[in-house]
Image: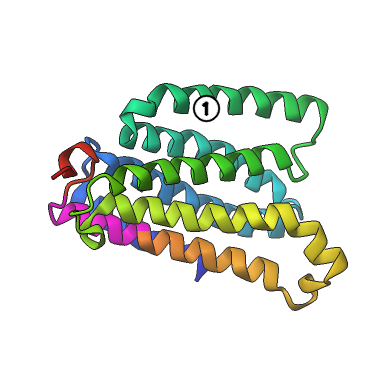
Amino acid sequence: MNRFSALAGCLYFLYFMRSWKSTSGIVFLILLFSLLADNFNYFFIRAIYPNSFIIGNSWYIVNYVITAFLFKEILKKHSRLIIGLLGLFILGTIVSFIFFYEFTESNVFIRLFSNASFIAFSLLVYFELLKSPSLQLTKLPLFWVVTSLFIYNSLLLLQGIFNNYLIFDLKISTFNLIPIIKLIGNIVKNFILFYALALIDKGYPDSLTTNKS
């Protein structure tokens, strides 16, 4: 289920939308790389090398670049901040892999920096939405896009911070709760993004500037 949770959104975009002029194109790329990463990871650790961090690290890097540009389009007045953090992320990623981490192990920097950045960007979008209380959030594609990213990155951030404590002190990993939470979060994220694409296709505006009352 998890490996194909992004497939519905990808197929919907390719068959019914194919619009690269709006945020829908970037949402499609997020779904596409999620789909590729989930399936490459599944076959990679079974046929090539028993280590999921190679694909995981690659996905974090690509996903940060794509999602940063999504937030840049949404939060145009904060574009310099977002581009600056993107540059810091790239620099930090290079330094972290040269001096601190192998590509075959979990890179704490790219994971925590990525999750924290997207949570902060999501909160900025929520703040902008609060300026227009008359908006129907349930019909606003950007609300669902941001909510999916907020939920998913919040789960990953909490997992990254408390992972060792949960595994070694509370022994939660014995019941496979940690990976299950991550998988559920990924599935929820992908289906919410699919719903957001459907709303955009129905004509609901996909930017903050066109949704102000």
Question: Where 136 sits versus 65, above or below?
Answer: below
Q: What colour scheme governs how the chains and residues are painted in the rendered image of this protein?
A: rainbow
- Magenta-highlighted residues: 193-204
**Quarter-of-image position of residue 182:** bottom right
Q: Is residue 203 magenta?
A: yes
- Give the left or right position of residue 53, taking residue 87 as reference: right
Element at badge 1?
Answer: helix
**Horizontal and vertical percent position of residue 11:** 31, 57
Q: Which residue is drawn at 74% across and 45% down?
A: 106
**Quarter-of-image position of residue 121:** top left
**Quarter that holds the C terminus:** top left
**Horizontal and vertical percent position of residue 88:** 59, 24
Foreground of the two, 175 or 43: 175
Residue 175 in sight from this viewpoint? yes
Q: Name the residue under label 1.
A: 86
Question: Where 80 sits versus 137, above or below?
Answer: above
Q: Residue at x 41, y 51 (%)?
A: 31
- As drawn, the residue found furthest toward the right would be 168
Amino acid type, mark 1: Leu
